[in-house]
Image (tube, rainbow, N blue to C red):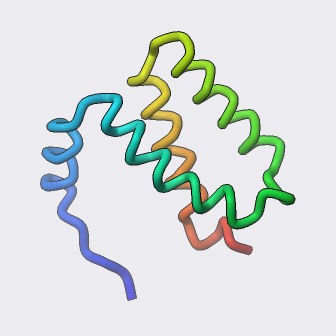
Amino acid sequence: MGQVVSLEAYREHRRSLTAVDRLDLAVSRLDPLVRRSPDRVQAGIERELRRIARAVAAGRPHEAAERAERLADRLEHPAAHG
């Protein structure tokens, strides 16, 4: 069964976090998802991980956080599991 989420509470919590905090949370979500099946990481996922790394290296944590959050959302979706 699904979980009811208050979008207002989610948005307020998200606004209170820095870009680096958001990036850290997104990476902690991504890590187990990518480690679970490293042999079948799709090219699109690998490309997005590289874009996240480049944004971090370029000093753009906001962009990196947005990309990492979107990728984690996509990989956590039930359709991503086949």
Q: Is residue 60 left or right of residue 2?
A: right
Q: Position of residue 62 (x, y in %)?
A: 39, 24
Q: Position of residue 56 (x, y in %)?
A: 52, 21
Residue 56 higher or lower than 33, as above or below: above
- Which residue is pictured at 23% across the width and 42% down the height? 14
Snapshot quadrant of residue 43 = top right
Quadrant where the N terminus lies? bottom left
Q: How many marks?
A: 0
- Which residue is pictured at 21% across the width and 56% down the height? 7
Snapshot quadrant of residue 15 = top left
Residue 75 higher or lower than 51, as above or below: below
Q: Nearer the viewer, residue 35 or 26?
A: 35
Snapshot quadrant of residue 40 = bottom right
- Which residue is pictured at 74% across the width and 74% down the height? 82
- Which residue is pictured at 56% across the width and 16% down the height? 57
Residue 65 higher or lower than 57, as above or below: below
Q: Nearer the viewer, residue 28 or 15?
A: 28
Q: Position of residue 74 (x, y in %)?
A: 57, 55
Q: Is residue 17 left or right of residue 30?
A: left
